[in-house]
Amino acid sequence: MVQDLYILMITAGVVSLLFKLLKQPVVLGYIVAGVLVGPYVFGKSLVSAENVEAWGNIGVLFVLFCIGLEFRIKNLISSGKIAAIGALTIIGGMMLLGFGVGQWAQLDTLNSLFLAGMLCMSSTTIVMKAVDEAGLSKERFVKGATSILIVEDVVAVVLMVLLSSIAIKHQFDGEELLKKVGVLALTLVAWFICGILIIPTFLRWVKKYLNDETLIILALGLCLGMVLTAEEAGFSSALGAFVMGSILAETVESHRIEKLMTPLKNVFAAIFFISVGMMINPANLVEFWPSILLVCLVVVFGMIVFGTLGCWWGGETMLDAMKTGFSFVQIGEFSFIIAALGNSLNVTHPALYPIIVASSVVTTFLTPYIMKASVPCYNFLYKHASPRLRTKIDQREEQVAQAEQQAGTSTDNKSSAADKARHAVRKTVVTKQLVNLFIKNMSEHDNESANDK
């Protein structure tokens, strides 16, 4: 086991360093490292596939736990319109497109549904890394893009539950799906209510006793406890990890936990992507290259179109909408999980997994370059747009600029307005108390006067 871990870390470190020098996403380096240590390049696997798979599963839990830590309801509400409309447009459009591609490729309904689920999610990890490496983290579009990715992650967790149900029953039962969604919704509400009522209060009580070591152990214990609870309730372990992360995101220690979890998440997430790479057979790339090319084209053009339209309909400027759409042009981590789910349940075509993984590698590689093309494409669109569309683009720019200015003004005056409100309430309460006290004293005085008479 130690030898396996040594080979994984050394290979991943060297390859990711090479990709870093080439200014490519580190995630891609991890996948390539998995190809190198896998069973297809040198004729045999250099590490135990069982150990890597076990570590990779732990990596999935930690990744989802950390995604949950980034999920804050107040941030989502502030850009709720963009998040809701953008995510629904992307997910709905890509699922219809993916299902259509599956039917065109003569896959059965179940395989087409799994393919649709694999193609409708972008990669939170890859998008955030690409944005950060491109120096765009302070750009205006990032807030809306992050909110959309959070909604996609939530929908992906629900989608995994639904696909599992469909796969086990081997039929599309609308009533069963609604029932499953209802049970899931009630379970999530119960978990969040209990968690938010108990855990933040508990952490406040013991805050002075929590050093970094104790806090990270407690957080991991809570995460794994929720994972076991989710499994006992009949849901995926990934759901439990995400829910506990979301609960801890509302506590006073959320940023501290997130900071402590980052190194651990990076290590196990790397192992997860290595395990994904180990599944790639280079021979399949040659054998299935037409399918891989088709999937890549569908993902790139579909995400650009639906991402841009969704953000534009949600209220973003055309430039920000296009920057968001152009950054979503890859297959996300949940696609691997959904593909692995189909494999484990023996319900998907054997060629589907290598096609998806290979397509993910290609789209991940292309993401930084496609992101850079967003501004030139916007300039081309604006230059050749009809006068009516150009007027709408200009009007949206003015509306967003005015909204930002008003938001900044309200933020500056927020504390003073709040102070005035508190003073008004305090004054009202004090006045009521004085009036009540006056009436009481007058009543007592009248009674005393009556007794004296």
Image (tube, grey):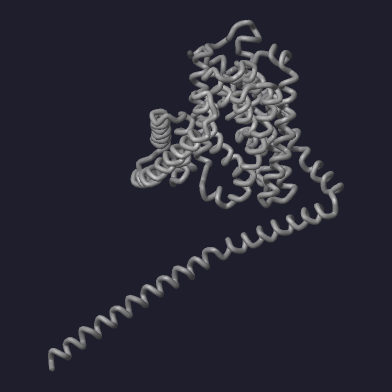
The structure residue drawn at horizontal position 68% and vertical position 27%, both measured from the top left corner, is: 20
x and y percentages locating residue 46 in the rendered image? 58, 10
Q: Is residue 96 above or below residue 445?
A: above
Would you say residue 217 is visible in this rendering?
no
The structure residue drawn at horizontal position 57% and vertical position 26%, both measured from the top left corner, is: 338
x and y percentages locating residue 395 in the rendered image? 76, 58
Q: How many marks?
A: 0
Residue found at the very far top of the displayed protein: 43
x and y percentages locating residue 433 in the rendered image? 32, 76
Residue found at the very far bottom of the displayed protein: 453
The quadrant holding residue 183 is: top left
Residue found at the very far right of the displayed protein: 384
x and y percentages locating residue 262 in the rendered image? 52, 34
Q: Is residue 76 above or below residue 339?
A: below
Q: Is residue 122 left or right of residue 185?
A: right
Work out which quarter of the rendered image holds the C terminus and state it: bottom left
The quadrant holding residue 228 is: top left
